[in-house]
Image (cartoon, grey):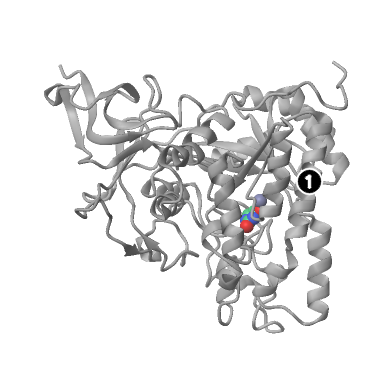
Amino acid sequence: MPIYDLLIINGIVVTDKEIGEFDVAVKGEQILAVEPRGSFSTREAVKVIDAQGGYVMPGGVDAHVHLQEPPMFGKGSTADNYETGSRSAIAGGTTTIITFAPQRKHEPSLLTILAATHAKAANNCFTDYSFHLLVSNPTPTALAEFATLRREGISSLKIYMTYEALQLHDAQILDVLLEARKNGITTMVHAENGHVIEWMTRKLEEEEKFAPKWHGTSHPPMAEFEATYRAICLSEFIDTPILIVHVSSPVAVEHIRAAQKKGLPIFAETCPQYVFLTAADLDKPGFEGAKCVCAPPPREGVADHEGIWEGLKDGTFTVFSSDHCPFKYEDREMGKMSSITPEYPEGRFRYIPNGIAGIETRLPLAMSAERLELRRLVQVTSTDAAKLYGLYPRKGALLPGSDADVTVWYPPTGKDGSLAEFELKNEMLHHNVDYTPFEGKKLKQWPRWTILRGQVVWDREKGGLLGEKGYGKFIKRDRSCLTGSRGLGEWKIPE
Ligand code: DUC
Ligand code: ZN
């Protein structure tokens, strides 16, 4: 009777804390042990993966994913459903995703939304998954449901300071933060000032500026850093943790860093689009710039990217997520081209659905950039996402008893330890989108194998996608293990 169901040997194991020559033993769906190279007998294993010197990491955790959502960010609906989005994740080395269960302004109950989102995901996922509740209508009914959400394994929610369909005013934000605090829920905040964006959009339209590139102008860094600072102040007042999502501007990073230095529980996320795309990508010929319309928009250039990399290196950012929010380019009903009408043949940026695909390219881009020390890369792409959102140590770790979720990368091929470069093309990807905003980027890495709860679900050399739709399951989450109230807020909440 074999002792191990799977052995991963000859790899360089990288976790948030360690890097070294270790072998990984898996029994059933869990990690049994991680021991120095050569510790396990391959004759005692049902299956052996020889990593041949490649990196072996905890499977990616992508905590910012929009799938199968109705129109909310402009005209269109997201192109990926739970099947195609999670399929794409697996092929890019991500084994757990947290998507959004979106409440719209006319909907009173969050529990109804949660049930509807479960129905969309059930039996359709290639990855394990959970949901953040997206709260756009914090009525007394909705707020009273937070306690039940926690019992249902939901320990985070998201709110917006922009988008007409979703925007909360400050008193509503305080309502949400207070209830979140009482229930041990972490609040994610889309921090852009929606009134500034609407004012800018109106001014640009008065000057007949409708092309995609004006989307960037309509979302100035000021709209982001004002809202970021305001969100920090509201969080400090209620004394409860928040995470600022998809930070794009170094000035917003400065506000976050200063708040963290004060000891406030302010967490932050950034995404590949803010280190790999720039405003020039919005200014491509014709309507092409629409392919990179997302919010906040890609910023001016290298100096902005450097400010974001610095925050990733020094720990200001807790997570590096994709904000996968895919819209097809050519689709005139639901995609980017839905903003083109006979009256506006070159489109109208105000109606271009905001969002880009990136669930599959997040880890390969991060690995290929070689900008982050590898333990730090594991932290921001897996371990700290799991910690922040109450999945650790089941996810984001290679500890005995953790789920055996593993990504194995290619070993160096060159004599000097280098890797061959190749060009990213949309045809390599597994999403349901007709383009990638990162087309043509030079990559050096791609996951060789992805393993989810002990099963090889991606083998790039032999069969590609091996996982089955429906193997991915809902994971109940606990409260965050990174956040906690300092109990030092200006305003003490009556018990
Ligand atoms: N930004 C995007 O680009 N898409 C979805 C939502 C968001 O905030
Ligand atoms: Zn957002």
Identify the element where label 1 is drawn: helix
Check disc 1 and give the amino acid type. Tyr
> As displayed, is residue 136 above or below residue 452?
below
Question: How crowded is the residue under tag 1: few (<14 C-alpha within 10 Å), some, or many (20+)?
Answer: some
Q: Residue at x 74, y 33 (%)?
A: 262
Residue 443 or 260: which is nearer the viewer? 260
> As displayed, is residue 189 above or below residue 147?
below
Specify whether 117 is left or right of 192: left
Residue at label 1?
A: 229
Inspect this view and state whether residue 134 appears.
Answer: no
Residue 339 or 253: which is nearer the viewer? 253
Q: Residue at x 25, y 36 (%)?
A: 11
Residue 116 image position (x, y, % from top left): 61, 40
Specify whether 487 is left or right of 118: right
Inspect this view and state whether residue 344 appears.
Answer: yes
Residue 120 image position (x, y, % from top left): 54, 43
> As displayed, is residue 44 above or below residue 339?
above
Residue 50, image quadrant: top left
Residue 235 image position (x, y, % from top left): 78, 35
